[in-house]
Amino acid sequence: MRELLFFIGGAGASGVLLWLVLLPRYVNRQIKNFQDELVDKHYAEVENIYRKMRGWRHDYHNHMQVLKAHMALRQYDQAEGYLDMLESDLTTVDTVLKTGNVMVDAILNSKLSLIGEKHIAVDATALVPGNIGISGVDLAVIIGNLLDNAMEACMEIERENQRFIRIYIDIMKKQLYISVTNSTKGTAPKVGSSFVTTKSGNHGYGLLRIDSIVHKYHGYINRQAEDGIFATEITLPLE
């Protein structure tokens, strides 16, 4: 009997040990899958913007011919109206921000395009050098996650005039500073000192991935929630 209990106990200990070994691998694999899906999504969004730009450039010659025809016929009102239409159309494909960093430009502008389509008020300021020693993929994951989460929170608010996102990215005291503040419906839920998501799927892995990247660069992350507002601040040392 004693031998049987020892065997069962040993088997149980082995099972726990095996689980402790496999669990981190499982979580890391899920996070990697999430990261791959996120980067693919970002590239698809950027490609959509570039496709619109290529299409507009392709039609440029035709637009000029129409304007010349209006001017030749002295149809100045029609020409002005056509220019107004082109200006409105161009705003949908022109980049919103030029930060100085190609990857940050790509991610920010793709997300800002989506934010605009969702009728969310946005205030964005960003200045990021081209070479800051931080992986472009890591920047994409951080910024993309922050803005996806902010958009999802805003879309839970019924009144469009109450939806807003504020973005500020800059170099401060030899650190990359990233701040995203958005409106929310109520207050974000917490378990202990950590905020949690109520959404299913890979959403929770996004929060873990942000934390993992911040830890990788020995950075700092601060999340704060009040009634109707959620804010995230991240600093990543550049040295």
Image: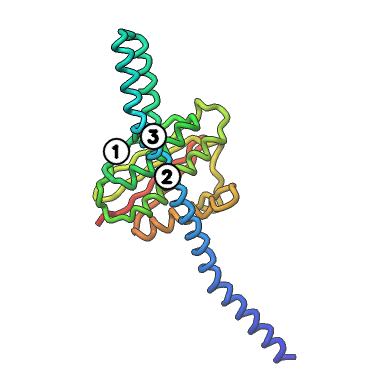
The mark lying in front, picked from 1 and 3, is 3
List the residue tagged with mark 2. Answer: 232
Mark 1 or mark 3, earlier in chain: 3
**Label 2: how many Cα within 10 Å (few below 14, some 14–19, many 20+):** some
Q: What element carries label 1?
A: loop
List the residue tagged with mark 1. Answer: 98
Q: Which of 155 and 116 is in front in this view?
A: 116
The mark lying in front, picked from 2 and 3, is 3
Q: Which of 86 and 160 is in front in this view?
A: 86
Q: What residue type is labelled 3?
A: Gly
Q: Which amino acid does label 1 sit on?
A: Lys
| Image location (x, y in percent) of residue 95 | 34, 35
**Label 3: how many Cα within 10 Å (few below 14, some 14–19, many 20+):** few
| Image location (x, y in percent) of residue 175 | 28, 50
Q: What is the CA distance from the residue labelled 1 to the residue labelled 2?
A: 22 Å
**Label 1: how many Cα within 10 Å (few below 14, some 14–19, many 20+):** some
Work out whether 62 lies above or below 165. above
Question: In percent of the image, x 39 and y 34: which residue is there?
Answer: 55
Question: In percent of the image, x 36 and y 35: which residue is there?
Answer: 53
Q: Quadrant of the C terminus?
A: bottom left
